Image (cartoon, grey):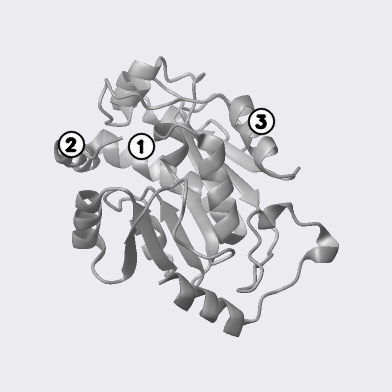
Amino acid sequence: MSFDPLQATSADQWLETELGRYIFSRQEKLILDLVSPDAGESLLDVGCGTGNYLRIFKQKKCVLTGMDSSAKALELARKKLGHQCELVLGNATDLPFSDNEFDVVTLMNGPQIVGDPQKVIAEAVRVSRNRVFIGFFNKISLAGTKHSVRKLFGLPVTPAMRFFTISEMHAIIKETMATSSVRWGSVIYLPGPAYAFFSELEELFPMKNNPLGAFVGMVVPVRYTYRTAQNPLMNSFDLKADAQAEAPEAIRGMLREGDR
């Protein structure tokens, strides 16, 4: 999906509106509730775009890295984030990072705009050593049709952005890795016009395990594994428990230097 500067400008303008700020605040609440970031944790946002979601974690004093396939998007992100965030040009299906390099990896839009969401999630799991957050738009929600949801979130109406049901995303995660402890929730339940008059109704809906919201977030725990310089492990998240070990910081430092 190519980067459109006009689209980025439109998204930023949407965030300056009362509706845009409210919807983003609801997303922020769900994300922080599920991710529970701690100060000092390393965090990678895959497909970071112009950096709006990274600013959520900047407030929590995380050590930030953003990656996107568009150099132009990263230029705009740099203006927002300054030098408090490392920004890397790369592909979501082939991340230019070592195994287990980040405490947290977030996918806010990645699974929705590329051809192989399973591969994107697998790469996110590979470079995480603790948890992965996946945010996506709900194919079935009270907020209305895909067209209505795009308008509600300030997105262009025409691009081929994928929507998923919650069961579809669960199935993709299950195909990617063995886990039974996915935590999830959703926000934004009402059609767009309702927020001008009844925004307080939004607060009455529970966020946890609610299948009706337009924006869904899932957190997937990741077992901490590592690869060695001599014998790389291409699917570290599939290792059995007796084959796992913690990587000394010296080894991780060598891996980072080797990837530069």
Residue extending farthest right: 242
The structure residue drawn at horizontal position 25% and vertical position 37%, both measured from the top left corner, is 2
Of labels 1 and 3, earlier in sequence is 1
Q: Secondary structure at mark 3?
A: helix
Residue extending farthest bottom: 250
Q: Position of residue 143 (x, y in %)?
A: 42, 20
Count of picture labels: 3
Of labels 3 and 2, earlier in sequence is 2
Q: Is there any visible trace of residue 7 in the rendered image?
A: yes
Residue that numbered label 1 is attached to: 23
| Foreground: disc 1 or disc 3 | 3
The type of residue carrying mark 2 is Ser
Q: Secondary structure at mark 1?
A: helix
Cα gap from disc 3 to disc 2, whole angstroms: 33 Å
User: With respect to residue 72, does 24 lie above or below?
Assistant: above
For this view, does 130 lie left or right of residue 42? Answer: right
The type of residue carrying mark 1 is Ile
Q: Secondary structure at mark 2?
A: helix
Q: Position of residue 116 (x, y in %)?
A: 50, 34
Residue that numbered label 3 is attached to: 171
The type of residue carrying mark 3 is Ala
The structure residue drawn at horizontal position 77% and vertical position 66%, both measured from the top left corner, is 244
Q: Position of residue 77 (x, y in %)?
A: 24, 56
Q: State the quadrant of the N terminus.
A: top left
Q: Position of residue 45 (x, y in %)?
A: 42, 54
User: With respect to residue 250, does 150 lie above or below?
Assistant: above
